[in-house]
Image: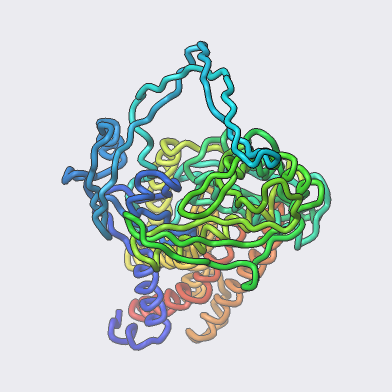
Amino acid sequence: MDIKKLFRNWRIWILIICLVFAIISIHPNPWASGVAIRSVIKDSPTYQAGFTSPKPNAAPMSREVIQSINNQPILNINDYNSYISKLLANTTITIKTNRDIYRVIVKSKYEIINLNETIFELYTESYFNETSNETINVTRQRIVNKTLTREVGIENIGLKVYDAPTTNIRKGLDLQGGTRVLLKPEEQINKTEVDTLIENMKQRLNVYGLSDIVVKSTSDLSGETFILVEIAGASDEEVKDLIAKQGKFEGKIGNDSVFRGGQDIRRVCKSADCSRIERCNKITDGYACRFMFAITLSTESAERHAELTKDMQIIIENGEGFLEKPLDLYLDDQLVDTLRIGESLKGRAETDISISGSGVGLTEQEALIEANANMKRLQTILITGSLPVKLSVVKTDNISPALGNEFINNTLFVGLIAMILVITTIIIRYKRLVVSIPIAITLCSEMIILLGVAALIGWNIDLIAIAAIIIAIGTGVDSQLVIIDEISGKYRNESVTLGFKDKIKNAFFIVMASYFTLVVAMIPLMFAGAGLLKGFAITTIIGISIGVFITRPAFAVVAENILKHHGE
């Protein structure tokens, strides 16, 4: 075989270049250790220490990895869980990652115990009598439940982690564990409503601290719309309960409802004239920046606000007057924010009111960014409120991480056995290693390039995608056998003599006919089963396309060189 002639052929160099880029995209590191951060719970000790959740589209190898805690090496998830379980309350731990060093304060966790006892408490209310022009103090008595608190351990430090990835290949839920839910709107909705629904669901999931989420619309062959939600590391019941409910957003003063998102919010301002960062002040631990934006309530909710606030006392803080009770914002009965009510709104049925809040940071720039993010989040919550339509659960798949690891091991074992059997069969048929080895190399090349493309575009590799890879490699073996048989002249009339170029043309005519037939067969599968087979169809098409346009032309050059060298 003429090696120099092979490397002068452009088809061989295209294959080599694609392999190099695929390996760079995959970024393999089998020696990686530590635990990667999946998400950071908002307002947790680690969040306050500076940890941030990775972006959903972040490459696995780019994620922040914890390497040690208090100089104790963390090699895997077992080391992490073991160390965290031994932490003591009211201590400070040092967490070293591949990016920075953080100091996290471990806080005590308390629970309230109701002793079912009551005590009488005296308190004083002051009234200004305009007739006598004097202040009258009235002593009253009220019943207070007697409670106490006790320490029950430590608070969750706020990190969700998993074993550090060794490649940029994203594993689907089948291989890493998690929940997949297929939802169906109970009424017909258009594309705009679907987009709104997806944004609402993402906001809801983010409020609940879930990450590594995929929320997308899909449809079946009949045109029915579905919503597919995939969440890594969340339990079946937790996800179903969270996303299947239509939900509600509510503003309360004490236990009394003032308004609900969607039905009572007429307008939320996002323009510069009524939505802005007001000021930044230096505080003990850095800076705090306040924001404000205007909203318009319905007349009914404004009247409820006036009725609830007319008898409230005014509290002066830092020269500003606020009502004694704040406005609490709830999403699905979970408190997400608390806002102070200005004294000017006491007892007034105002439909146009201002919502304010703040953001804090070590620097003024960090505080500004945090304040702007908090403002946008609140605006989104107030706009979205409840989901626009009710959803029903069509299908739920829940895979444990342990089962996912077992799937990976079994898949690798079966794949290795299959490749050995294929190579053995080829050796038996052609009785030449010199023919069988290029076929094996081509198969490996196709797999590497396909995985490189998956890593580059962020495509998840799950059991369905693995089945598609097997299909693509199987068609690759078939095409290579066709190329060898055509070039060697097997099964052809001996009276017909063709040159190597004509033989290769005949081989690729068969290969391309098979390719287009398979592509046409895969297109309906992209929409079948509410889109759940879309990954199988797309992976198959990408795999056979890589074979037809990259690896098989290079294999044809190698096969021609080999057979010419052996005088066939």
Q: Residue furthest front?
A: 132
Quadrant location, the N terminus: bottom left
Residue at image position (74%, 45%) is: 306
Residue at image position (69%, 58%) is: 295
Report whether 244 appears left or right of 264.
left
In this rendering, the count of numbered labels is: 0
Q: Where does residue 302 sit, x and y in percent of width and height?
A: 76, 49
Q: Nearer the viewer, residue 433 or 332?
A: 332
Color theme of the render: rainbow
Q: Where does residue 337 sit, x and y in percent of width and height?
A: 55, 46
Residue at image position (55%, 70%) is: 545
Report whether 74 appears left or right of 535.
left
Vertically, is 547 above or below 183?
A: below
Q: Where does residue 483 sit, x and y in percent of width and height?
A: 50, 72
Q: Residue furthest left?
A: 71
Report whether 394 appears left or right of 511.
right
Report whether 231 appears left or right of 36.
right
Quadrant location, the C terminus: bottom left
Residue at image position (77%, 55%) is: 221
Residue 25 shows in this picture = yes
Q: Nearer the viewer, residue 310 or 3?
A: 310
Vertically, is 402 above or below 383?
A: above
Q: Where does residue 103 sit, x and y in percent of width and height?
A: 25, 49
Residue 428 shows in this picture = no
Vertically, is 142 above or below 248?
A: above
Q: Nearer the viewer, residue 542 or 481?
A: 542
